[in-house]
Each structure stands twice: as C-alpha cells, then as structure tokens.
Image (cartoon, rainbow, N blue to C red):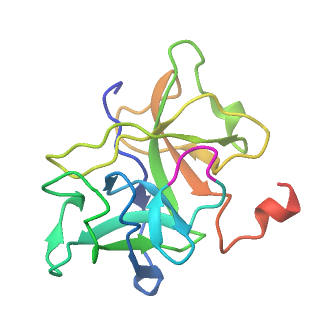
C-alpha cells in the first residue's frame, strides 16, 4: 500500500448541501481532488499544508474558466496568476469522514492511536487521475488538522506502517475544536 497516496477520500455519503463552489486563488499551485483547502480572504481557496491554519474542507471537483469539469486545478497547464475564473467544489461538512493513507518507515500505527491527531503531508498530485498525493504520518496528541477515528474497514487493510485510516477534519472553519484546545 506504500504508493496508495490519494489525499482524503470521502468515506460514507456526502451531504450535497455541504458541497460549496469557491473561486480558486489564481496565485496558488495545482489543487487536486482530495486536497485539503483553506480560504484565502478576498481571493478564493488554495491548497492547505500542515501549518496553514484552519481548513475550509476538501476539494471534490473543479470547473475551469469556461465552466467545464476538469480533473484538477491547473489542468492542462500549470497554474499561474493568469488562471482566473476557475472554481473548486469543496466538501465543507465538518462532520464528513474521510479515508486517508498512513505511511511511516518505522512507526507502526495501531489501535492505541485512535483519538490522536495528525497533519496532512502534501504530496505530488496525479495529473492522470486528478487525485491528490497527500497522506498522514507521525500521529501526535497535540493540535493537528486531522483526528484519527480508526482503521478503514477495507479488505486486506491492517494496522502497521502502511495502512488506510478513517479521519475527520479537526481544525475546520465550521468547528470550534481549535478554540476548545481539543
């Protein structure tokens, strides 16, 4: 499973009313399906890294400047400040659960990590599939974007250094979790 990096994949049904269309910050780099995004005031959304603050949600689709669905932001050219008019469809539901890949060369994840947190490692997106390259590693008990709920119930998946886990966004604009210090 070491190459199964795909960002955050919705687990369970998505609330259709939670899918919100945002402008894309034209100065940002590519954004892929499964990337966590943040709001950039007066500009739109951009890909979020581990220390970028509070998440708006997860990218689930894109429309280019002509309103045509495309696999990722920046398709087929690299993003630049000239890529205006693009839209990012974002799942803004703070209660949505996601499946994400966990990988660490030496630290095995096990059931004792349920209830801990982890930040996303932004990886290289796949320009063929449009999927993000993000994954998690090194869980902690401190503040982090994602809350680990457990092992993803898929065939062949087992706790270890390379597995699929269920998470929920903890540091989300529609949650008050960060303010509570959870």
Give the mark count.
Answer: 0
Quadrant of the image occupied by residue 163: top left
Residue 101: in magenta span: no
Against 43, residue 146 (above or below) is: above
Quadrant of the image occupied by residue 16: bottom left
Give the dominant element type of the magenta stretch: helix, strand or loop.
loop
Residue 95 in the image: x percent, y percent? 59, 69
Magenta region: which residues? 48-52
Quadrant of the image occupied by residue 181: bottom right
Residue 143 in the image: x percent, y percent? 76, 46
Residue occupying the point 45% across, 40% down: 122
Residue 172 shown left or right of residue 61 in the figure: right
Observer-nearest of 99 and 31: 31
Against 2, residue 57 (above or below) is: below
As drawn, the residue found furthest toward the top would be 106
- Location of the C terminus by quadrant is bottom right
Residue 121 in the image: x percent, y percent? 50, 37
Residue 116 in the image: x percent, y percent? 72, 41
Residue 174 shown left or right of residue 92 in the figure: right
Residue 148 shown left or right of residue 152 in the figure: right
Against 25, residue 79 (above or below) is: above
Observer-nearest of 155 and 8: 8
Observer-nearest of 81 and 65: 81
């Amino acid at each position: 499973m070491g190459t199964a990096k795909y960002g955050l994949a919705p687990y369970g049904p998505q609330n259709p009313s939670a899918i919100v269309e945002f402008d894309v910050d034209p100065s940002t780099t590519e954004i892929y399906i499964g990337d966590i995004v943040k709001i950039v005031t007066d500009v739109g959304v951009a890909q979020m890294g581990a220390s970028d603050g509070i998440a708006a949600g997860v990218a689930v689709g894109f429309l280019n400047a002509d309103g045509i669905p495309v696999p990722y932001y920046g398709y087929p050219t690299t993003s630049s400040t000239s890529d205006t008019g693009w839209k990012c469809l974002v799942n803004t539901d703070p209660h949505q659960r996601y499946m994400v890949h966990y990988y660490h060369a030496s630290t095995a994840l096990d059931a004792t990590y349920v209830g801990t947190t982890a930040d996303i490692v932004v990886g290289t997106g796949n320009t063929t599939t449009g999927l993000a390259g993000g994954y998690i590693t090194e869980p902690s008990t401190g503040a982090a974007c994602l809350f680990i709920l457990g092992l993803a119930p898929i065939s062949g998946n087992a706790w270890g250094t390379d597995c699929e886990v269920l998470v929920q966004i903890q540091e989300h604009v529609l949650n008050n979790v960060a303010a509570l210090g959870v």
